[in-house]
Amino acid sequence: MRNYMRKLAYLVALFAISCATTAGSYDDFFRAVISDNPGTVRSLIERGFDPNTVNEKKQTGLILALREPSPKVAKVLIESPKTDVSAVNGSDESPLMMAALKGQQEFVTMLLARDAAVNKTGWAPLHYAATSGQITIMKQLLEASAFIDAQSPNGTTPLMMAAMYGSPEAVKLLLDEGADIAMKNEQGMTALDFAKRGNRPDAIQMLTAAAAKAPRPASDGKW
């Protein structure tokens, strides 16, 4: 019985030490991410810390590094084979979405090279790139087979986001690549409606012209 109690006490002590070490690594990891300290991040990963751990706000280290930005840490995390480069945060945002929104072309290229998910259910990287008018990144995503008419949870497409928030160049690119101008979101709004709501004259002009050129449905013979 006495030996059993000693073993139990030993195991409890080991567990306590393990918990304390993990907690310390957790704090060290996210401090290093914020301060863009790649050496500490690399060392922690080599010692077994999971780089896919999320903080109290459900942010992964990689998404946090891209958002800050902490470019040196972001590079270390993307290059680490232990990092899930498609892992989303609590808002269902992926690293590729964040890099696209921020116009971080170098990281978009690195993420695509690691086969980060270009398409996903709900908001997708192309939505985010279109929102901030990141033309080069939009082209990269489309070349990587991004679905041009991807729909957010409420049915919003990249063209709608570009029409309201992006640049005229972003709208033109999506139209040239064949985006569907007739699609509507759950509120019944088309990309043209988005442009009007955003008071975007250039987008309104382009979308109106595109609608005029769009093929009309075939007549069924009724008048």
Image (cartoon, rainbow, N blue to C red):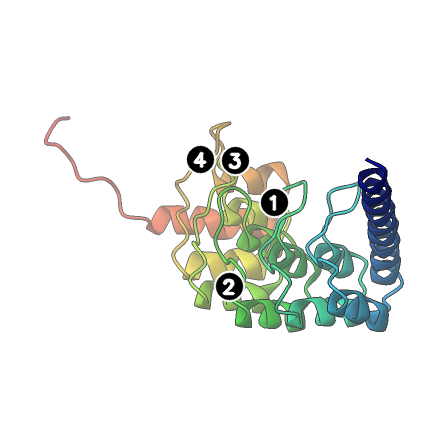
- Which residue matches tag 3? 153
Task: Report how many numbered discs are placed on residues in the image.
Answer: 4
Amino acid identity at mark 4 = Lys
Q: Earlier in the sequence, mark 3 or mark 1?
A: 3
- Which residue matches tag 2? 141
User: Where does the image place residue 126, in percent across and percent down from the top left?
Assistant: 54, 55
Q: Alpha-carbon neighbours of circle 1 within 10 Å: few (<14), some, or many (≥20)?
A: many
- Tell me the CA gap for discs 3 and 1: 18 Å
- Which residue matches tag 4? 184
Q: Residue at x 49, y 44 (%)?
A: 157
Q: Earlier in the sequence, mark 4 or mark 2?
A: 2
Looking at the image, which is closer to me, 130 or 219? 130
- Tell me the CA gap for discs 4 and 2: 23 Å
Q: What element does badge 1 sit on?
A: helix
User: Where does the image place residue 93, in percent across and percent down from the top left?
Assistant: 63, 48
Q: Earlier in the sequence, mark 3 or mark 4?
A: 3
- Which residue matches tag 1? 164
Looking at the image, which is closer to me, 123 or 210? 123
Q: What element does badge 3 sit on?
A: loop
Q: Earlier in the sequence, mark 2 or mark 1?
A: 2
Q: Residue at x 77, y 60 (%)?
A: 65
